[in-house]
Amino acid sequence: MEPQAHLETNDTIATLVLNRPDAHNAMSIGMLNAAHECMDKLDAMDTKPTVLVITGAGRSFCAGMDLKEVIIDEDPTIPRQLLETLARLTHRIRLFPAVTLARVNGAAIGGGCGLSTVCDISITHEDAKLGFPEVDLGLCPAVVAPWLVRKIGAGKARQVLLTGGLMSGARAAEFGIVTHAVESREQLDEAVSGAASALATGGPDALRATKSLLNTLDGSEDLDILLEAAALSASVLSTEDAQNRLKSRRK
Amino acid sequence: MIKLTTHNQADRMIALIAFDRAGKRNALTPEMLTELIDLAPKAAADHDAIVLTGEGKVFCSGFDLALCQTTPDGDIMRQLLTGLSNACQTLKAIDKPVVIAAHGAAIAGGCAILGGADVVVTDTHAKLGYPVTKIGVSPAVSAPFFGASVPKGVCREKLLLPMLFFGAHAHKIGLAHLLTDEPEQVLDLALETAANLASKPPHAYAATKRLVAKLEDPNQSETARKGLTASLQLTGKPEEQRMLGALTF
């Protein structure tokens, strides 16, 4: 069985691939743990890559939480585990000492859009579907909220998170949720490759020092706020209303 | 290498401070930054507003890198980074209007200094940006000032991705506030803007400026210190020596 996330390395550029294409790379605990294992491997490297690209296998980037795991049938602790695992993964990606570049190849929804948001730079195409529809499902997008506020500011984040729904890649670029949206999916690889190559021309020490300072200035080092957010999100998720909405969605 | 003249614009006395090194595209030396830090508050005291510009075709092309190469131990680079941080803080601390006319190009340190202005005027095709990681230098010193001008996500992208962008894009992201089609129009618009701002009641302007600065960052000097420290820690180190040393002029 293929790992649910794997790592490809090429000199100064590494790529972490979310690998559940049949499920649109929806976040299961298994996939998140596999992504953590990829981060473990990166942490263990003596010479770190200069750029870490994060992308999804198949036509989607990441469709958000796997509904099968957040509907409480048997084990009520699983949603909290999943959200905490996601919170810790976003924190690790943010603090990883390489520039992170999200290649948003298709749908990036909820926590999936959060994975893109936490990256230093993100590129998608105009027709991709992105957004944070959690409130529509009776959920609270708490884990991704700190990252979105840091990226686009509190005013715009308030609008995006409270409005819910999805938007095009083009609109996401207008909001600043992604750095750039190319016109078509076919142009994505060239744009990502160009950005990764440009980043890799930078001095690794200079890039690391700059990223570290930016993380210090915007509060990215704070893990506690993410764990509190995961607890809040799990609490809202376990309400009867949220569970009913999720079950009807699954049907 | 800094020139001060007084310009009467609509009966307002504008201090026109110009980088005066057109032959070197106004590349910054430590002396230029020291002069600016010394001159700007004095000029503000004697005038209604300040406009900072550059002689010749561009506003400022950044640090004088050929000069930096003369001290591989990073001494000149250290002086420049420290001077840049101090210059931005000095400009921000001036109570009167500070407008920067950034025509043609504002690159690296020249782009960072825009963070000291109340209003930045540029032209549509001017080239701006912070492509300094390519020479092993961290633009962290600019982050406290640039980060106050644009959304944090944009700040992160522009400081990490070593690519230039046009004036029109600078306007879109909020780094520049007023845009003209032609570089030759930038200074005129900056002078008009400075005179207009100087026509406001000075105490109200000063109080509002101080309030906005405090809301941006209540610990501005500490944040500036952190940014400078992050950049200084790399000066004279092997990566910078190798990448900066490889440049040819």
Image (spheres, rainbow, N blue to C red):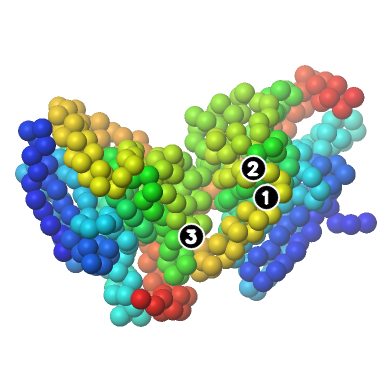
Q: Give, as a three-letter code, the residue at label 1.
A: Gln
Q: Amino acid at mark 3?
A: Pro
Q: Amino acid at mark 2?
A: Glu
Q: Is residue B1 above or below residue B87?
A: below
Q: CA distance from mark 1 to mark 3?
A: 21 Å
Pointer 3: residues within 10 angstroms few (<14), some, or many (20+)? many
Where residue B22 appears, as percent x and y from the top left, is 22, 63
Look at the numbered disc 1 and give the secondary structure of its residue: helix
Q: Residues within 10 Å of mark 1 (few under 14, many from 20)?
A: few
Q: Quadrant of residue A149?
A: top right
Residue at (52%, 41%) from the top-left corner? A150
Of badges 1 and 3, nearer the viewer stands: 1
Q: Quick check: marks 2 and 1 in contact, CB under 8 Å?
A: yes
Alpha carbon separation for disc pair 2 and 1: 7 Å
Dot label at residue A183: 2
* Camera-nearest residue between A154 and A69: A154
Name the side, left or right, on which B65 lies relative to A207: left
Say if labels 1 and 3 share a chain: no
Residue drawn at (14%, 29%) of the image = B199
In this rendering, position of residue A81 left or right of residue A132: right
**Chain under callout 2:** A
Disc ID at residue A187: 1
Vertical arrangement, residue A5 with respect to residue A230, above or below: below
Q: Which residue is under mark 3?
A: B162
The residue lying toward the viewer, choosing from A195 and B103, is B103
In the visual, does A176 lie left or right of B191?
Answer: right
